[in-house]
Image: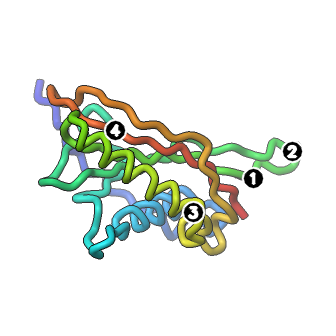
Amino acid sequence: MKIETDIEYEFTVTEDTSLDFKFATSISNWLCTNMANLTDTNDKTIFGKVNTGFDENTIKTFGKKPVCDVYINNVEYNTDFDNHKPEQVNTIILFYMKGANNHTYMKACELHDYILQEFVTNENYQRLTDVVRDTYITNSELMTQPINKKWGVMGAFELTHILY
């Protein structure tokens, strides 16, 4: 038996999905763009790569830059008898940095604080036109852990996006 691991799905439903229901794709793309465009003081991008949907046990790093992953965690609905409208989307942003020494951990703390600042002060990280009315950080963590037989520091942000 041969198992194919990299399957590409070939279907298109974008044009068949009305704008009222395109929030998951829009939010994933928006968060990925924000994280990919995040720059440091020297105007250099912070992340070597921004992914969607990678399993946290297979996160790969690229060079000396951390990697970021974006996930849709769940969607909460208004459960009115006549209406089952999505009200909010909960997402997770993970970043991973190779190494577990003091310098790597402090850099992870620095990056955590910077991402926190962007979500609290930057309207481009809080609102997405006609999709997300507001974004709140519901939890964040920094943890040292083994991934792929190497130690690293993983940062996590849990976000809640209130839909229009």
Q: Residue at x 60, y 71 (%)?
A: 123
Q: Contact, CB < 8 Å: mark 4 with mark 3?
A: no
- Image coordinates for residue 127, horizontal then vertical, percent: 62, 68
The C terminus sits in image quarter: bottom right
Q: Contact, CB < 8 Å: mark 2 with mark 1?
A: yes
Task: Work out whether residue 138 or residue 114 is closer to the camera in this orientation and state it.
Answer: 114
Helix, strand or loop for disc 3: loop
Mark 1 packing: few (<14 Cα in 10 Å), some, or many (20+)?
some
Helix, strand or loop for disc 1: loop
Helix, strand or loop for disc 2: loop
Q: Earlier in the sequence, mark 4 or mark 3?
A: 3
Mark 3 — residue? 22
Horizontal placement of 32 versus 121: left or right? left
Mark 2 — residue? 80
Task: Work out whether residue 20 or residue 164 is closer to the camera in this orientation and state it.
Answer: 164
Which quadrant would residue 47 be assigned to in this image? bottom left
Q: What's the distance in space between the residues labelled 4 and 2, CA to CA?
A: 39 Å
Task: Work out whether residue 57 or residue 87 is closer to the camera in this orientation and state it.
Answer: 57
Q: What's the distance in space between the residues labelled 3 and 2, CA to CA?
A: 21 Å
